[in-house]
Image (spheres, helix red, strand yellow):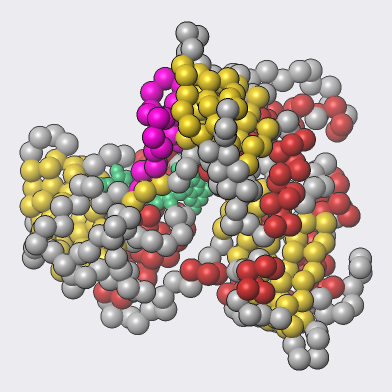
Amino acid sequence: MSDHFDLVVIGGGPGGYSGALYGASAGLKVALVEKDALGGTCLNRGCIPAKAFLETAAVKRHVDHADDFGIDSGKASVNFARTQERKQGIVAGLVGGIAAMCKQRKVEVFNGVGSLSAGKTVNVAMNDGSSASITGDFVMLASGSVPRLIPNFERGGPIMTSDEVLDLDVVPARVAVIGGGAIGCEFASTFADLGAEVTILEGLPKILPGLDKDMAKVVERSFKKKKIAIRTGVMVNGHTPNASGGTTVHYGDSESVEVDAVVVSVGRRPYADQLGLDGTGVVVDERGFVQVDEYCRTGETGVYAVGDLINTPQLAHVGYAEAILVVKDLLGESPMPVMYDRVPWAIYSHPEVAWAGPGEQEAKEAGHDVVVSKHPFKFNSRAQILGETEGFVKVIAKKRPDGTAGQVLGVHMVGPWVTEQLSGGYLAVNWEASVDEIAEFIQPHPSLSELFGETVLAMTGRSFNG
Ligand SMILES: Cc1cc2nc3c(=O)[nH]c(=O)nc-3n(C[C@H](O)[C@H](O)[C@H](O)COP(=O)(O)OP(=O)(O)OC[C@H]3O[C@@H](n4cnc5c(N)ncnc54)[C@H](O)[C@@H]3O)c2cc1C
């Protein structure tokens, strides 16, 4: 193995592996150091397995409603061990794909813990017990994040973080989800659709607190229809395990809920714990994030940091964007910094949520005079064919001096397959397109994406459907 590279990447998650592969495709000689499985949190303990579970929940929902479509299928039962096996197959395939791409692009993978020291030297404690010392002209830190924990809820038995939940091979009958953010809501939605009794315990006044209010209301209403109990404005205090392997979670003043599993989903903390960094100018702030400028450059010349390790949206695709930015920057290509206020967001619960740009309130708070248009899936033909009519598309545009709608600021969607429909809205926001320009685009019929077209068309002052 060589010991000097153009680029050494520490961490093989979305930020790290995309940086390594993109860098190699630009002709760089790259080393990738990963202590665990390639693919990081996203592939092994995050996005992909969580969505595989959600898909099983969707299949169960479809079978439960098959009768509505004229299919007599009987009552569905869940074999979650099979779900787990299927999910593992998907993960293994994708992890293998990254390894194959690394091989094809001659990225040298070092299986071990990498720590950075002076002179852009990365010492690797290899998993086989040996050690390696490699250097790079440039180094990219991409060591990601781990679940945050809360006092009195140590992992073990019924107390789980996303890491352990994704290894389950049975559906717990009663689940408490602590934290009503995106990840918590995805788990709540999955387990409720699979037949569990679910309680969400959220400290803030609302679940999904960052969301446009109208969208959060749709999710909340839909969750209540699934019989998910939502307790907001409550803090959990502790839990009392019982003899049958479950536990009673205590919250609020003196309330409690008895469950078989607790999913602690209160966010993720950056994981710089094993990066060393002695003798370098890399600065880690008091919350554990590596400090960077808008080009992801750290305090040490030639050393960059990307992904969940830095204080930017904790999304796999943000890690990809930052990795591309870094490679372009180190190649001297003068890239544009990532515009974090316009990145796409997606929550894959049922109903799904997706958005780019500010919500109505946020746009107003930023000082914009806005025009807002909101159209429901209820009247969309494809949504009716799918039997999925809840939700809407909401577009927020700048108001022109004459009162008409101008530049599209935000596109927010809740409802069927909106995570797949956002791309048109994302382009509109990021191209800084006006409502009139977007209204020119033809959407296929019948399609869910017609609703975005309709919503924008209505903002021109003329429309088909109001
Ligand atoms: C349940 C769940 C669902 C999610 N769903 C989504 C989603 O739908 N969409 C989305 O965009 N995001 C989602 N995320 C977030 C997403 O997984 C993260 O934003 C993303 O994985 C961050 O990528 P990263 O490369 O920065 O870090 P990570 O993916 O955490 O990867 C870091 C890697 O670095 C390795 N490492 C750490 N330290 C060292 C070291 N010193 N030496 C060697 N290796 C090291 C780790 O083993 C790990 O493999 C989800 C997360 C969870 C938990």
Instruction: Pinpoint residue 172: horizontal percent, then vertical percent.
Output: 56, 20
Is 111 displayed left or right of 217 in the figure?
Answer: left
Residue sitting farthest toward the top? 243
Q: Which residue occupies 28% across, 71% down?
A: 297
In the image, residue 132 sits, relative to residue 429, either above or below, namely: above
Is 99 displayed left or right of 176 in the figure?
Answer: left
Q: Which residue occupies 39% across, 41% down?
A: 147
Q: Which residue occupies 31% across, 39% down?
A: 37
Image quarter of residue 54 = top right
Instruction: Pinpoint residue 367: horizontal percent, then vertical percent.
Output: 63, 80
Magenta residues (range): 144-169
Q: Predominant secondary structure in magenta?
A: loop
Q: Is residue 363 magenta?
A: no
Instruction: Pinpoint residue 235: horizontal percent, then vertical percent.
Output: 53, 38
Is 88 displayed left or right of 6 in the figure?
Answer: right
Instruction: Pinpoint residue 57: horizontal percent, then vertical percent.
Output: 64, 32
Seen from the viewer's position, the closer of residues 43 and 161 is: 161
